[in-house]
């Protein structure tokens, strides 16, 4: 039994024996299609110095434009200019903001961001919106289960394989769940994503839900879509 399967089995065994069950609702999953990845000017599915060189060549030497205009507009000003190159170099070398991370404050502006947006209302409902979780492009379905163990909340996402077989690609999905009747308190939220590559940071954070709050927590993924086992 693999580590992840063992972890889920242990969680389920413990939760249903000792914890308060939680119920949830999920939106039907829909594969999101991005035409170009922000910052990936040369369309090689990663962000590196070669993307900055590609943009410089386009801007100053008449080289080819990015395959998708949006991929080069790192600062989201609607232009392809030296400011995008500076923005990209600042991200690569001095840990600046990820490309397109500031567009209106929405995680959807960058498909390299894997985010959990959450809101806790006065009726004790915890609404969570997972933006950009990676699955096979054509699953039969995606299921979500929530386990509450004390003040820990585990979100487990699973893919139901397509009977016709998986597509030779990965893409991103947005999933929503609601946990009703959650008592106020400080909670740890952990999201289990089946295609998370080894060494990648997990969505694992603590939130103060003692009063109404709306916020989001994001981690940056270096590849689009991250962990694609079919990419050659």
Image (cartoon, rainbow, N blue to C red):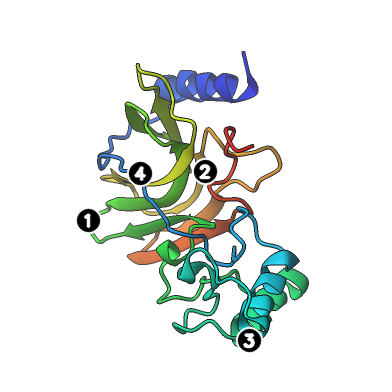
Identify the residue position indicated by label 1 in the image: 123
Q: Is residue 121 left or right of residue 217?
A: left
Residue 71, given in percent of the width and then of the height, sits at 52, 67
- In terms of depth relative to the viewer, which is nearer, 119 or 182? 119
Identify the residue position indicated by label 4 in the image: 31
Q: How crowded is mark 1: few (under 14 residues within 10 Å), some or many (20 or more)?
A: few
Q: Say which quarter of the image contains residue 20.
A: top left
Assign the N terminus to one quadrant of the image: top right
- In terms of depth relative to the viewer, which is nearer, 170 or 177? 170
Estimate the spatial distance between the alpha carbons at disc 3 and disc 4, rounded to whole Å: 33 Å
Residue 16, given in percent of the width and then of the height, sits at 40, 21
Image position of 59 with respect to 26: above or below: below
Estimate the spatial distance between the alpha carbons at disc 1 and disc 2, rounded to whole Å: 23 Å
Q: What element carries label 1?
A: loop
Identify the residue position indicated by label 3 in the image: 82
Question: Which circle, 3 or 4, is nearer the viewer?
Answer: 3
Q: How many numbered dots are placed on residues in this image?
A: 4
Q: Which of marks 3 and 4 is nearer the N terminus?
A: 4
Q: Is residue 104 left or right of residue 14?
A: left
Label at residue 137: none
Q: Residues within 10 Å of mark 2 (few under 14, many from 20)?
A: some
- In terms of depth relative to the viewer, which is nearer, 217 or 59? 59
Q: In this view, does 227 lie to the left or right of 120?
A: right
Q: Which residue lies furthest to the left in this view?
A: 123
- In terms of depth relative to the viewer, which is nearer, 130 or 88? 88
Estimate the spatial distance between the alpha carbons at disc 4 and disc 2, rounded to whole Å: 23 Å
């Amino acid at each position: 039994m693999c580590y992840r399967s063992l972890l889920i089995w242990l969680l389920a065994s413990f939760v249903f024996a000792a914890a308060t069950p939680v119920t949830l609702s999920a939106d039907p999953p829909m594969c999101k299609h991005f035409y170009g990845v922000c910052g990936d000017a040369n369309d090689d599915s990663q962000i590196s110095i070669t993307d900055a060189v590609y943009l410089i060549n386009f801007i100053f030497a008449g080289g080819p434009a990015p395959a998708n205009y949006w991929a080069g507009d790192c600062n989201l000003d609607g232009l392809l200019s030296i400011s995008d190159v500076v923005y990209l170099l600042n991200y690569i070398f001095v840990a600046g903001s990820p490309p397109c991370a500031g567009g209106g404050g929405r995680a959807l502006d960058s498909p390299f961001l894997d985010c959990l947006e959450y809101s806790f209302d006065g009726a004790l409902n915890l609404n969570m919106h997972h933006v950009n979780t990676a699955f096979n492009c054509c699953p039969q379905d995606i299921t979500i289960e929530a386990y509450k163990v004390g003040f820990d909340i585990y979100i487990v996402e699973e893919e139901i394989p397509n009977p016709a077989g998986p597509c030779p690609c990965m893409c991103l999905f947005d999933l929503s769940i609601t946990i009703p009747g959650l008592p106020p308190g400080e909670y740890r939220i952990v999201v289990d994503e089946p295609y998370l590559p080894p060494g990648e940071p997990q969505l694992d954070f603590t939130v103060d839900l003692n009063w109404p709050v709306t916020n989001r927590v994001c981690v940056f993924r270096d590849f689009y879509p991250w962990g694609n086992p079919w990419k050659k």
